[in-house]
Amino acid sequence: MSSAQLAHLREAVQGLEKIIAIVLILLAAAVVLRLSVFLIRRTLRARTDRLLDETRRRTLQPLLESLVKYVVYFIALVMILRELNVDATAILASAGAVGLAVGLGAQSLMRDVIAGFFLITEGLIHVGDVITFDGHTGTVERVSIRTTQIRTAGGELWTIPNGKLEVFGNKGPASGAPR
């Protein structure tokens, strides 16, 4: 074998090693994500009797799963970038500066997120509650960190930014059963 062929073979093996490493990172991320979702569901289901009622569990579970999903994807992305010899610290620093600029410009988004955090942690709204907001009465179908969705008796789905939910009426669960 000539030195040129040997160099080409060495480059091919290095490229294959990077591809295998990236595939392993993605597989590990998928396993961690599945395991995390399983543990979140199991933990929340076990605590339904003691600390959490069913409506709070149905509200918190998707939020925690989403948070874990984004953290796992972010870590996997940084690991893949490092595997490709991309300096992740420069990208993270740039993302921090851009995040600060966007944060200053997106104050209503931050208001929605903060309000959503308090709505959820204080247990003011749960999936299945019947609420009245701005003349619209409906059953809460989804509470996320940024928005709340209610479906009216007429079938309309209203998406309300949590920052707008300053004053609302909550009649409790649609079933009428006390929490």
Image (cartoon, rainbow, N blue to C red):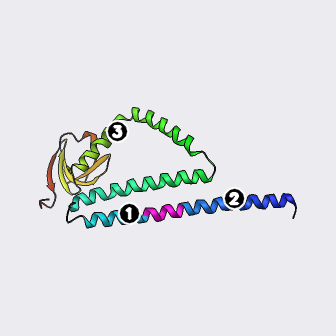
> Nearest the camera: 140 or 103?
103
Which residue is rendered at x = 44% and y = 35% of the image? 100
Mark 3 is on which residue type?
A: Met
The percent position of residue 9, horizontal first and vertical second, equals: 78, 62
Is 17 placed left or right of 97 in the picture? right
Residue under circle 1? 37
Q: How far apart, in angstroms, are the residues tagged by discs 3 and 1?
A: 26 Å
Which residue is rendered at x = 63% and y = 60% of the image? 19
Instruction: Please tell me whether residue 50 belongs to the stretch shown in magenta.
Output: no
Residue under circle 2? 15
Residue under circle 3? 110
Q: Are the residues at dot 2 and dot 3 in contact (C-beta closer than 8 Å)? A: no
Q: Within 10 angstroms of label 1, few (less than 14), some, or many (20 or more) residues? A: some
Which residue is rendered at x = 27% and y = 40% of the image? 163
The percent position of residue 136, horizontal first and vertical second, equals: 19, 46
Q: Earlier in the sequence, mark 2 or mark 1?
A: 2
Is 173 placed left or right of 143 in the picture? left
